Image: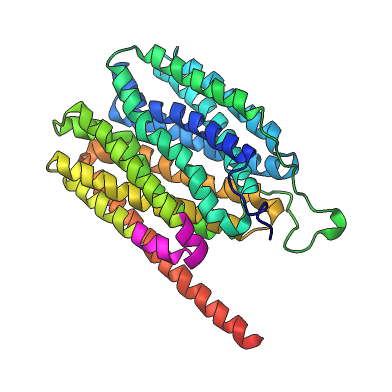
Amino acid sequence: MTETKEKIWTKDFILIVIVNFFIFTAFQMTLPTLPLFVQEIGASDRWIGIVVGIFTFSALLVRPTAGKLLDTKGRAPVFITGLIIFVISMFSLAVSYTITILLLVRIMQGAGWGLSSTSSGTIATDLVPRKRRGEGLGYYGLSGNIALAFGPALGLFLTDHISFTMLFSICGGLGFIALILASNIKYKKADTPDQSQKTKDTYVPRFDIVEKRALPAASLLFFITVTFGGIATFLPVYTFEKGFDSQYIQFYFMIYAAFLMLSRIIAGRLYDKKGIAVVFIPGSITIIIAMIMLGFLPSPSYLFIAAALYGFGFGCVQPALQAWAVNRVENNRRGMANATYFSAFDLGVGFGAMSYGFVAEAFGYSTIYFTSAVSVTIALILFLVMMNRYKKEDRLNANRV
């Protein structure tokens, strides 16, 4: 393979990274502030979970359609449409003065997010060489991590100085910048095989809503992102209940993002050279420890150490699982593989946000994080079972040769 084909940092890859940065910055600024906005309009913790969860389930419903359209119609129309919907919904948050309007806007926002984020991940996959996919997707993910480094903190900071209406308008403006930049990307055409070339592996069923070969990675991701739903939705109010200064939660997100970026750079290369087990197992263990620390949370120092551990662990497992899911399918199934993968992400975050709202009301916020530790433990056990099964299958196939 030539040096040109192995290059990661092309013009289009740089553009998709920048676009992803602006999308995620807008998204991350609303992530910790929406629960506070829900409380301001007089709703309970249960409604906080529903407002967050309905967004993710809306995205979840859209993703299979997005994946199929990406594979059959091409990347550009799906991506641009998703960005337009996302930008309109961001501006609409500025006038969502009742819980009913807010829920409707969040459904719309989830649809735009489902289309745009599935497209963005697929476009990034198109633009990096297969042999450097773990590394390339790790770099791509850094754009979201950099946004995460200051997006939540910036959102929380701005809520102390400006209205929620102005905050959401700023987020809409960031989405609009992403839309303008996205229009300058040269997109690859849909890689659909000729009818005469369709085989058992390339045949696409009529009711095509999931890529089965991406399900192992997606199922593991679900149990891990349940923890993200608990952190993103309830950690701000949990720390406030503990009496921590409001700046501490801002430091949490910055520490988390810093270690997330660090581990992505290391983990992506390790995945390409050593395989998924080398990054998934230690990553999962550090997430479990972080959840247990958040469950106890006797002092701010526990919060900061948990942020570092969670960032490192999540940065290890997330890009590795995405690369694993995409590498198991043909080129013409990348869109659906990414849709399946991100659907699991949405389902985990949404399930965590909505179910933990009831858990918080019944048992308190600390129970959220102990339960999350159990969820990641299940993912780790499932991974070990999968690896053992694949090793047995490889030995059987070797004996048949």
Horizontal side, residue 189 vs residue 263: left or right: right
Q: Is residue 113 magenta?
A: no
Whether residue 19 is visible, yes or no, is yes
Q: Main secondary structure of the magenta part?
A: helix
Whether residue 230 is visible, yes or no, is no
Give the farthest residue toward the front: 3
Q: Is residue 47 above or below residue 6?
A: above
Q: Residue at x 50, y 65 (%)?
A: 273
Give the quadrant of residue 190. top right
Q: Is residue 240 above or below residue 101?
A: below
Give the farthest residue toward the right: 196
Q: Give the quadrant of the N terminus.
A: bottom right
Q: Give the quadrant of the C terminus.
A: bottom right
Q: Residue 352: percent from the left, percent from the top?
A: 37, 43
Q: Residue 206: percent from the left, percent from the top?
A: 74, 49
Q: Is residue 31 above or below residue 6?
A: above
Q: Residue at x 81, y 59 (%)?
A: 198
Q: How many marks?
A: 0
Provide the residue span drawn in magenta: 268-283
Q: Residue 141: percent from the left, percent from the top?
A: 48, 43
Horizontal side, residue 67 vs residue 258: left or right: right
Give the quadrant of residue 236. top left
